[in-house]
Every structure is written in structure tokens, then in C-alpha cells.
Amino acid sequence: MSLLRRIVVVSKQAELQQLAQQVGQEIFVADDLAEALDIVETVNPELTIFDDSFTPGHIREFLDKTDKNLGNVPVVVVGGIQNDAAAPTQFMQAGAYDYVQTSRDCSRLRQIAQSIKDRHEGGGPDKSPSPFFVDEHAAAVSMAGRSRAFVKTLGMIRLVAASKCNPVLIVGETGTGKELAAKAVHALRCPDGQFVAVNCAALTANLLESELFGHVKGSFTGADREKIGLLELAGPGAILLDEISEMPSDLQAKLLRVLQEKTFRKVGGLRDIPCNATIIASSNRNLYKEMKADRFRRDLYYRLNICPVFIAPLRSPDRQEDIPLLAEYFLQASTICPEKRQKVTCLTKFAMEVLEKHDWPGNVRELCNVIDRAILLETTDKIGLSSIILDQDECEESAESQSGVQIRDFSLAKAERELIARALQETGWQKTQAAALLGITRATLYAKVKQYNIKKDLSGRQEPQCDAPASSYLQPAIA
Ligand SMILES: Nc1ncnc2c1ncn2[C@@H]1O[C@H](COP(=O)(O)OP(=O)(O)OP(=O)(O)O)[C@@H](O)[C@H]1O
Ligand SMILES: [Mg+2]
């Protein structure tokens, strides 16, 4: 089944969070009602799950408060704490969408999630196909993009997921969406199974080994009880070995054995445990080069590299068209500033141009952050150039290549001033036209002309005069 996008879980019970993970992509957890109201307002979830330590009165209060601002957020209550036979009726009377007897009843929650999804899709704007996603599957895992390179990647994901290919290798620069792609493979292949991930660069060799394989009690100092490893925990689901190139060499050998034998042993254990999970490895390093440099085992490289899924960087020519699409997508999906959600709805032409010309070394993650930051900074209803803050070095490059002018003393404010001056020049100081060109209102243009002290040159020269003191360039842009 396709997943709900965002779920808020109001509970301290870990089981409830795990249950929610079976039907949702992004899970947010609140401890109490006040926190729940805050989070719900921020993330606008498709479902909120409460445990039954909350009373029907709490649910009524929650619905009353959220209904005012957000409309109807369905609430599901999961029982198990109170064991009160009358509870389901009371919760439903208080306005709950449904009641699930226990946190172990995953299939019931799936049915409910499906009915919520159907309800969303039953009418209104959600029914029309989204411009951001190639198909329903890409939408279900929130993989936005329509470029040729991206469609190829999606095709590969589909192909690999439908096959028995195991292990699966996903390669791409940092931030290109490797983890998202791993989740997409998993969602297609075994949607009901667990998805677990471990970052091979984040743990010491010993910790990583015990994390992966688990250990038996007493197998090393501090192993005071038996531990189940992620390979076992994943069951028939999937395990993502992130940054596989950073895995220590002797552990690479042990992993190779798992891939060949489909069994493993806990640290200190003697029993072979079957491994049924899909093993997905991801790397932002070139594994071939790592292998050639003797930093990655040759045998493991060839075992992993069966049918690699490659994700192109954003700057590559056949993926560049995803930049404006992803910018628009993050603009509408951002949860950073809920009060601006309906207000800031698009980007100006110049702002978009700057994004398109940027190199994006941090790829999709960097773009997502830039849009979040722009939403925070923007004071009008359109993201303008002054709210787009890129990495300084890249920024200089893209501004230079954009204007063809060598801007040595670079600052965003200065770039903005130059653009305004250019727009005024091009339109012969027709302020309405210049404002339209810049994608700002006339009032904003007036304010900025004043702020930057841009003057019309009356000597007959074409260029407008900009003689603002340096300090004024540091002032934030005004609406
Ligand atoms: N096609 C996409 N559509 C929407 N969001 C995306 C897309 N690709 C990546 N993202 C988002 O960008 C961020 C980075 O993605 P992800 O963590 O999957 O990248 P990664 O390649 O694993 O990065 P790293 O190498 O640094 O671990 C995440 O927030 C993810 O949701
Ligand atoms: Mg990753």
C-alpha cells in the first residue's frame, strides 16, 4: 500500500512509533497534548495517533483546537493501556476517526491509513496528478523529479525492486537521495517489512559489528545481555548499509560471507542465523576507485555491483531541469514556517535563475535547505533574490556567470542592488515594468531604490548610479 506522508504520534510508547512507521513516511512524536498541537500545526499531518492514556476529553479538546486552524485531522486512538471495554465508543463519540485495540494490530492500522488516503484522493485537488512526481509510486515515497536522468533512476529502482537482486547498490554524490531511493526499493519489494539503516562511517569497527550481527551475552566486556543485530531485526525487510566504503576491511569480509551464505552469526555466537533481508548498500564515493586504491575489497565490490542504481547530481545536464521543479516542490512541502505556508507561494524569475545556475555540491539536500532558509527570510509572498543565500564561493561563481559582470566585492545585497539597477536601466526607469521584471511590488521597488540609494544618471549615461554606503548593503532586504 502507499504510505501516508506525515503522522504525529502522541505517546511515550515506542511500540506506537514503530506501528506508525509501518504506514507513514515521516513520523513526529509528541509527549503531551500541548506538544501535539504545536507539532500538528507545524507539519500538517494526514493522521494523528494517540494512545489510550489520553481521555476522550483530551481528544475532543485536541480536535476542537486543530479544527479551527487546520480542518479535520483524523485521530486514531490505540488501546492497550486502559483495557476499558467502553473506550472505543467513548473515543469515537469524542470525534476519533477510529480505534485500534492494540499496538500489535498493524493490519487494522493499514486499513485505516488506506481509507484516509482514499478519502483524500476521493475529491478535490489531491486527485489531479502532481506535477512533481512521475507516478504514484514516486509520489508515495516523495521522490520528486521528472528529468531524463531521474526517470532513468526511477526505472532502475523499479527493475531492481521487482527482481530478486540482493544486494542492491545505490551510488550518487552526497544529498542526491540515496536513502530515499533505498526506501523506494524497499517500499516496492517488501512494503510490510521493516526498513533499518546503519551508517558505516558513524560507528567504530566493534560497535558496527555488534550493531549488524548482534552479540551473545558475555561475548565481550560490557556485553551483559544478548543483543539482536540489525540483520536479524530487518527480518524479510531491508537493511541499508549507508557509506559502505567506510566499512572496516575485516567487517567487509564478514559481510561478503553473509551475502554469499545468506546466514550470519552473532558476535560470540555459534548458531547460524538466516538472513532474509534485502541488503542495500549506498556510497557517495566511487567504489571502483576505492577498490583500485585497495581501500575496498575487490570481492565485495564485484558482489555488490550487480545492478547499481545511479543517482545523478543535480548539476548534471540531464538532471538540471529538476532544479526548478524541486525548488517549487520544497517550497510547497516545507514545514519550516507554517504561518507562511499559504503565503509564500512562488519564486521570482531572478531567484529561480540563480538556483538554476548554482552548482549544488550538496545536491537535493542543499537545495531543500536553501528553500527552507529563503522561506524564513522572505517577507513578501514571492521568494526574491535577497532571500536566496547560497554558499558564498559557489554564489560568486554563479552570479558572475549569470551577469557576465565580474563582481569582486560580492555580497547578496550588492547583487540585489545591481539587479535592481539593471532592471531599471533595461526598462528606462519604468518602475512598474522594472518591478514586474524583478517579481516584486512597486512599493518594494521604491523601498529598495531608497535603501540602496540608486539614482538615475542625468548626465546621459545609461547606467544608474549606485552610491550606497557599504554598511547599507548589510541591512536586510525590506518588503
Ligand atoms: N528526488 C527527491 N525528491 C524529494 N526530496 C528528495 C529527493 N532526493 C532527495 N531528497 C531529500 O533530500 C535529502 C537528502 O536525501 P538522502 O538522505 O536520501 O540523500 P543521500 O544521498 O543519502 O545523502 P548522503 O550521501 O549525504 O547520506 C532528504 O531530506 C531527502 O528527503
Ligand atoms: Mg544517506
Image (tube, rainbow, N blue to C red):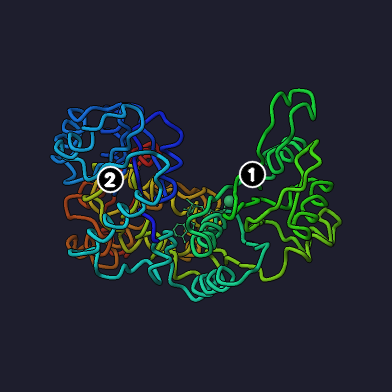
Identity, as a three-letter code, of the amino acid under mark 1: Leu
Quadrant location of the N terminus in the rendered image? bottom left
Label placed on residue 114: none
Q: Residues within 10 Å of mark 2 (few under 14, many from 20)?
A: some
Q: Residue at x 56, y 68 (%)?
A: 161
Q: Label 1 neighbourhood size at 10 Å, few (<14), some (14-19), many (20+)? A: many
- What secondary structure is marked by label 2? loop
Tell which of 175 and 298 is nearer to you. 298
**Helix, strand or loop for disc 1:** helix
Foreground residue among 440 and 71: 71
Q: Which mark is residue 230?
A: 1
Structural distance between the alpha carbons of marks 2 and 1: 32 Å
Asked where in the image residue 303 lies, by quadrant, the reply is bottom right
Is residue 467 visible from the viewing direction of this image?
no
State the residue position of label 2. 44
Asked if residue 124 lies left or right of residue 170, the reply is: left
**Residue 87, position as x, y percentages in the image:** 23, 33
Which numbered disc, 2 or 1, marks the residue that appears first in the sequence? 2
Q: Can the viewer see residue 353?
A: yes
Q: In this orientation, which residue lies closer to the viewer: 421 or 352?
A: 352
Tell me whether circle 2 and circle 1 mark residues in contact (CB < 8 Å).
Answer: no
| Residue at point 47%, 64% (across, down) | 357
Q: Residue furthest front?
A: 85
Classify residue 139 by image quadrant.
Answer: bottom left
Q: Residue at x 78, y 26 (%)?
A: 218
Hey, what amino acid is under mark 2? Asn
- What x and y, as percent, mark residue 373? 39, 45
Please, is residue 11 above or below residue 357 in the view? Answer: above
Image location (x, y in percent) of residue 190: 52, 60
Q: Is residue 4 left or right of residue 296?
A: left
